[in-house]
Image: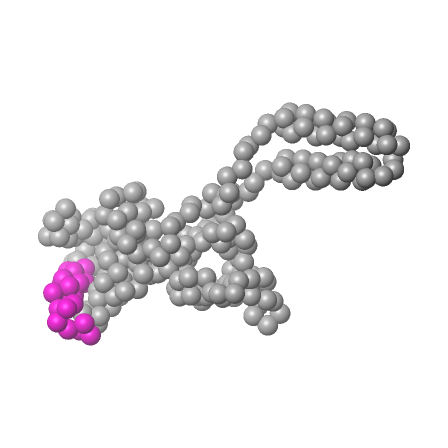
Amino acid sequence: MSPKLFFAVLLLLVAVAFPARAEIELERFEQAIADHQKAVEVLDSNPALASMLFHQAITEQQQLLGSNPDLGWLHYNIAIAHLHMGRNAQAIASLRKAQRLLGHQPQITANLASARRAPYTPPGSPPIPMPDLPVWVLFAVATASWTASWIMLALCRGRGIVALVAVIVMVTTAATTALASIPSSTEYAGELVLRDDVVAYTGPGERAYQAVYNKPLPGATEHAIIERRGGWILIRNTDGKSVWIPRESAIVIWEE
């Protein structure tokens, strides 16, 4: 879709979405589009002016979203302005919102790929795929292991290395069976994107808890939200660990 056709369609959508205040909203939107296009034109020759114009365009379109947050193409247009400004985290958040509203449009997917610093793993996808075994298989394996262990204990009369091995097998089998029978949770409270590199902690606090990793989590990366507690958010990192980050270090994409 050409830029002129795209903006014409968007103007029509805005007019339909804001019938009561169509004239005012259309004027605001037209100004936002004019600022955006002017910023693109002067981006190479005058970066400072381009940045100011992009910021104005973003502010004007965010005001339009305040009345109707379900206009996906406004989210997309805001994302493109953020991308031009090098604000990848903000661009990812807006593109993901546009994607939720408009679906996997090719231009949204392409711009997400260019904005991301790391491959995206959807929430609920375990870092290491585990086979989903039926309960009867787990029960059969556990029964066979326990039977073999009791036979070993009987043969060695509960003494020696063989007895120790039998006990280890029994305990390990019981623990493995119990863990394997617990269904993996794919319930998350939302998703977010990190604004900048941020240190992750073992608990909700910098003083009372230790850092989880020896380097910060990279900015412009997406994570699942598990829990909120005060000014902290518990997220699931891409390695499967649950870690805490400060609330102000992230932009929420969606939340239940």
Q: How is the image coloured?
A: one colour
Q: In this view, does 231 lie to the left or right of 166?
A: left
Whole-percent x, y for residue 87 in the image: 30, 64
Whole-percent x, y for residue 107 in the image: 23, 48
Name the residue: 63% across, 26% down: 137
Whole-percent x, y for residue 238 in the image: 47, 51
Pick the front one: 16 or 74: 74
Where residue 77 sits, quadrant-wise, is: bottom left
Q: Can residue 255 be seen in this view?
A: no
Q: Is residue 43 visible?
A: yes
User: In the rendered structure, does residue 242 fall within the stretch colored magenta?
Assistant: no
Magenta stretch, main secondary structure class: helix
Residue 41 vertical placement versus 73 (above, below): below
Where residue 212 sits, quadrant-wise, is: bottom right
User: In the rendered structure, does residue 44 fall within the stretch colored magenta?
Assistant: yes
Name the residue: 55% across, 54% down: 242
Q: Is residue 189 left or right of residue 4?
A: right
Name the residue: 42% across, 47% down: 121
Whole-percent x, y for residue 140 in the image: 68, 25
Pick the front one: 145 or 13: 145
**Which region is colored magenta?**
29-49
Residue 93 vertical placement versus 43 (above, below): above
Name the residue: 25% across, 43% down: 105
Number of numbered discs visible in the structure rendering: 0
| Residue at far front of view | 161
